[in-house]
Image (cartoon, rainbow, N blue to C red):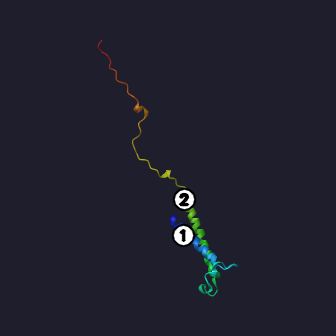
């Protein structure tokens, strides 16, 4: 899930950068390279359309960033050690089980 959101984040960054650079400013920006934007965006020009698109993409960017932060925080709370499973085996022998046994001494009853 996080990989899909990360790809969406990269696409949003690229689109947001392009939209901001297309907006009219004192130094025209990239709008000078695209020709006449008024015919593409309608009679009012690109101002209102680009402003709304910038706000919408900015909102999506912030929402996606918060979602990614939530998912990465959830992943950070997990540990690799929590996922280790140990096989069930017989209990290990204790020191008393491995102690040497003294040989049996027979009692001499022939007196």
Tell me the quadrant of the picture where the C terminus can be found: top left
Does 14 sit left or right of 99 as displayed? right
Q: Name the residue under label 1.
A: 8
Mark earlier in primary sequence (1, 2): 1
Label total for image: 2
What is the residue that sits farthest to the front in this orientation? 33
Residue 31 coordinates in the image, percent (x, y): 63, 80
Q: What element carries label 1?
A: helix
Residue 41 coordinates in the image, percent (x, y): 60, 84
Q: What element carries label 2?
A: helix
Residue at x 58% of width, y 74% of height: 15
Q: Taking 66 as reference, is 77 above or below it? A: above
Quick one: 92 or 53, which is closer to the camera? 53
Residue 25 coordinates in the image, percent (x, y): 68, 78
Q: Taking 46 as reference, is 89 above or below it? A: above
Q: Taking 34 as reference, is 67 above or below it? A: above
Residue at x 59% of width, y 65% of height: 66
Residue at x 60% of width, y 72% of height: 59
- Label 1 Cα neighbours within 10 Å, binned few <14 / some 14-19 / many ≥20: some
Quick one: 13 or 61, which is closer to the camera? 13
Q: Which mark is residue 74?
A: 2
């Amino acid at each position: 899930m996080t990989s899909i959101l990360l790809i969406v984040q990269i696409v949003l960054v690229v689109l947001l950068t392009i939209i901001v650079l297309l907006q009219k400013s004192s130094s025209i920006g990239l709008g000078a390279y695209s020709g006449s934007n008024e015919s593409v965006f309608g009679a009012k020009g690109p101002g209102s359309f680009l402003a709304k698109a910038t706000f919408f993409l900015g909102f999506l960017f912030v929402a996606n960033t918060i979602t990614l932060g939530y998912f990465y925080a959830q992943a950070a709370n997990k540990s690799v050690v929590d996922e280790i499973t140990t096989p069930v085996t017989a209990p290990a022998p204790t020191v008393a089980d491995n102690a040497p046994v003294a040989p049996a001494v027979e009692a001499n009853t022939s007196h």
